[in-house]
Amino acid sequence: MTTVVLPEPPVKELPKPLKGGVFVLFWVIAIVLWIIAPHIADPRWGALVVDTGLVFASVGFAATAITSLRAFTNSLIAGVLAIALFAVGDLIEITALVYFLRMFVPFLALLAPLYSTVGKIKVWYA
């Protein structure tokens, strides 16, 4: 049996200052949104603002553990998708979708540091 080993494509690393900047910027945006949300008259729009802050905080938290530019771009795309799903759930009042996303989005953000740590640990060697 022969084994074909393909060379791995080069990975563009995400610079550490960019990681820290995204973390701080997104958390500032999230805190501002959480401060503004109680002053919105329509509760559906207020909930959307709170949930958008949740997405910004989650993506900012995950950005510190993301190592490649491609993974960072994918997390931003997932954040935009989450905001769109929150908009659908909050404005149409699909409660099950909103509560699922309120648990799932931070859960995915917590997985990023876990996977980056596990990726650095070499358990089995070929």
Image (cartoon, rainbow, N blue to C red):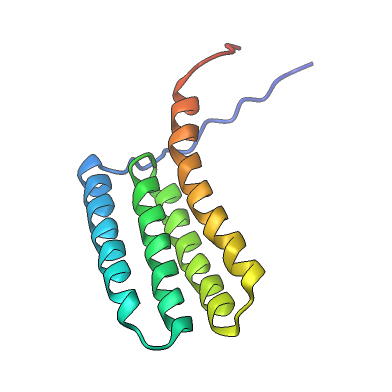
**Which quadrant would residue 40 be assigned to in this image?**
bottom left
Q: Is 108 above or below relative to 101? A: above
Q: Is 17 above or below relative to 60? A: above
**Which quadrant would residue 48 be assigned to in this image?**
bottom left
Q: Is 9 above or below relative to 123? A: below
User: Which of the image's four quarters has the N terminus?
Assistant: top right
Residue at far top of view: 125
**Horizontal side, residue 15 vs residue 93: left or right:** left
Image coordinates of residue 23 in percent, x first then y, are: 28, 50
Q: Residue at x 66, y 68 (%)?
A: 96
Q: Residue at x 45, y 75 (%)?
A: 47
State the residue in front, 107 or 2.
Answer: 107
State the residue in front, 101 or 10.
Answer: 101
**Horizontal side, residue 6 vs residue 70: left or right:** right
User: Which of the image's four quarters has the C terminus?
Assistant: top right
**Which quadrant would residue 103 be assigned to in this image?**
bottom right
Q: Residue at x 47, y 55 (%)?
A: 74
